Amino acid sequence: MRRFLLMLIVLLCVSSTVAAQSASPSDPSSPASGGKPADEQTALIKALLERMARLEERIAELEARKPAAIAVPSAEAIAPAAVTEKAAPPAPSGQRGMNHPGMGQGNAPSQEAVFPSLKISGFADVVFSATNESNVNSGFNLGQLVLHMASPLSKKVSYFGEISFTATATGYNVEVERSIIRYDRNDYFKLSFGRYHTPVSYWNTAFHHGAWLQTTISRPEMIKFGSRLLPVHFIGFLSEGDVRSGSAGLTYSVGVGNGRGATISRGGDAGDVNNNRAWLINLNSRPAKPYGLQFGGTIYRDKLSPAAGQRFNEWISSAYLAWTHETPEFLAEFSNVHHFDVNTSRKFNTQAFYVQLAYRLPFAEKKWKPYYRFDYINRPATETVLGITDFMSSTVGLRWDISDYAAFKSEYRNTKKGPGQPHINGLFLQTSFTF
């Protein structure tokens, strides 16, 4: 098209020149009045044609350079962030704090969404321990190797799984820690099914498996893995989302599922031990200011059948306050586990709490973080369900982030288990990382 227009313009110019030169000599403005010979007209036309050829070559050269010089952005590059995020929905959370690094939320697609799109990440740690506890040897422990698997299945449906490998005296124990499929209707309603970390504790849903995620080496005693005090895992469904609350930042969780298994420390993965489902209600607040502040609470209800003929009603109420600003970091939780013996009408209340303080030091690229935690559990002597003892512990430690994805931690612990028992002193070292 450009060449056609150029040729047309040149031809018009040539025609005008020829017409002007053939005009009447009586016209004083005519170039022909000067009596120019015909060979001059021919030379003029030739010069114009040569100029047209050079212009065509220049146009061809510019068109050849155009693809390399001018990059046309793709539709994904100029699309709003909200559009590209919908193509890769976040991994199922089930509760606050679950979108930590390593959750496998996936990258925004460069061209278009592909379903499913699996991403795998992991955590691992190695621990050295030495204590004066009788019949306990010092030495190294491999800790846990944890794999996170996340995959969007559509724009609103996603899957998340977590598998752990734990070293034992006879080999390795493989456990499906979480397996969740979630439908994200919108920010106010998300529905998921599977195996969760029970949202009855802030720590249990904020840090999960993978010691690199938490400041300390160990979890609090009240919510340690294998705990008999609080149910660590929950199998069922969970509805969650935001609550329209402005700067209060309210979120909720409502769940129904299997209660504790025949082994109190485990959930009912293969089915409930009775015909009564456990349920829970959780409400949290993340106000806009100050940054990093969170608080909330949970009510958990279940009916237990730990042995033939035994029936207990269980009510767990818990509350937490967390400030994760890191300068300082403050975590505190309290739980009351109430059991009612249906056969004897006796009541038992076991209380537990922890308080943890930490501060990321401002020098040395902010890689050093000292911390302290106090743990406490008080169980009535007549309580027969949990089978635990009183517990009190003080932990002093230091975390050193040797890179953005690895940390070295050292802890000193002073622990007392049960009345009349001696204090146990221990030194613990750990390297933990994510990949």
Image (cartoon, rainbow, N blue to C red):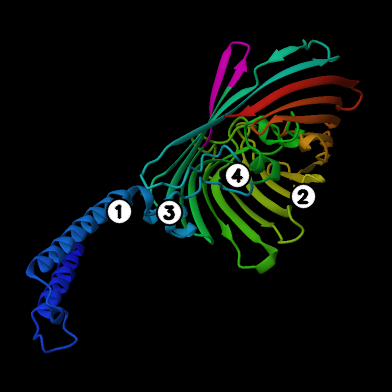
Instruction: Mark 4 or mark 1: name the one nearer the start of the chain.
Output: 1
- Measured in 3D between alpha carbons, the distance from the residue under mark 3 to the one under mark 2, in whole angstroms, is 36 Å
- Measured in 3D between alpha carbons, the distance from the residue under mark 1 to the one under mark 3, in whole angstroms, is 26 Å
Left or right of 134: which side holds 74?
Answer: left
- Image position, residue 157 (x, y; %): 42, 50
Q: Look at the image and give the residue range highlighted in magenta.
A: 166-178
411 and 281: which is toward the camera = 411
Q: Secondary structure at mark 4?
A: loop
- Residue at mark 2: 323
Left or right of 105: which side holds 400?
Answer: right
Q: Categorize mark 1 by other alpha carbons within 10 Å: few (<14), some (14-19), many (20+).
A: few
Amino acid, disc 4? Met
Amino acid, disc 3? Ala
Is the N terminus in the top left, top right, bottom left or bottom right quadrant?
A: bottom left
Instruction: Mark 4 or mark 2: name the one nearer the start of the chain.
Output: 4
- Residue at mark 1: 62
Q: Residue 286 is drawn in which quadrant?
A: bottom right
47 and 100: which is toward the camera = 47
